[in-house]
């Protein structure tokens, strides 16, 4: 089993001269700051890691927006680092729906029984002491677990918060 860690690494010269780099624009203080991605794994009693810099094109791209805000500007808009940062922003843009929200998925999801669903309602079920997110299927009333990636491009049809308050419903309708 492994984990992915993200870090912002700031590079400065000991003598105080500005850092020269072909990938990053030097910041006002003469430094550059880049993203580092660390894959960790524990297997057969051994622990190991793999470190990558954002311009090496790592696949893992779920760094938080707060980390991206710390990074230096890029010189090349077509670089691996630029594409990686965009994937991180796309991941962060996937909505985190509230309990009771009715959602239309961007594309129908095929379930293990061969059926499909596209309109779901956010809910949960209890397993032991944990609350697990799941979604009620509009057509059948069954429950399904969906990955965050399957919510990309989805649309909020109705908000549970809006249903509780007509004033809030009007406000939320104006935001779409």
Image (cartoon, rainbow, N blue to C red):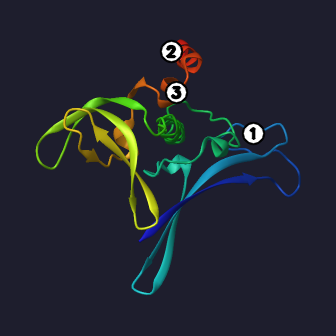
Q: Are marks 3 and 2 in contact (CB under 8 Å)?
A: no
Report crowding for label 1: few under 14, some 14 to 19, many 20 or more residues within 10 A (C-alpha): many
Residue 98 at x, y percent in the picture? 49, 38
How far apart are the two marked residues, 1 and 3, measured between alpha carbons?
A: 51 Å
Label 2, on which residue? 173
Relative to residue 170, is residue 28 drawn left or right? right
Name the residue: 83% across, 36% down.
28
Of residues 135 and 76, the one nearer the viewer is 135
Name the residue: 39% across, 85% down.
44
Label 3, on which residue? 164
Relative to residue 41, is residue 108 drawn left or right? left
Label 1, on which residue? 26
How far apart are the two marked residues, 2 and 1, measured between alpha carbons?
A: 43 Å
Mark 2: secondary structure: helix
Report crowding for label 3: few under 14, some 14 to 19, many 20 or more residues within 10 A (C-alpha): few
Which badge, 3 or 2, comes first in the chain's sequence? 3
Instruction: Please identify the quadrant where the N terminus is shown.
Output: bottom left
* Mark toward the viewer: 1 or 3: 3
């Amino acid at each position: 089993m492994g984990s992915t860690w993200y870090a912002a690494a700031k590079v400065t010269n000991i003598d105080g001269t500005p850092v020269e780099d072909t990938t990053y624009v030097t910041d006002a203080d003469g430094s550059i700051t880049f993203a580092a991605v660390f894959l960790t794994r524990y297997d057969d009693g051994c622990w190991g890691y793999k470190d990558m810099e954002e311009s090496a094109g790592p696949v893992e791209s779920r760094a938080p927006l707060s980390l991206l805000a710390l990074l230096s500007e890029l010189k090349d808009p077509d670089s691996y680092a630029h594409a990686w940062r965009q994937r991180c922003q796309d991941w962060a843009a996937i909505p985190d729906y509230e309990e009771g929200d009715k959602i239309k998925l961007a594309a129908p999801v095929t379930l293990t029984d061969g059926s499909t669903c596209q309109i779901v309602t956010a809910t949960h079920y209890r397993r032991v002491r944990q609350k697990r997110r799941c979604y009620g299927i509009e057509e059948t009333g069954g429950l399904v677990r969906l990955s965050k990636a399957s919510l990309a491009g989805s649309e909020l049809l109705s908000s549970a918060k809006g249903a509780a308050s007509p004033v809030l419903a009007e406000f939320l309708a104006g935001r779409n």
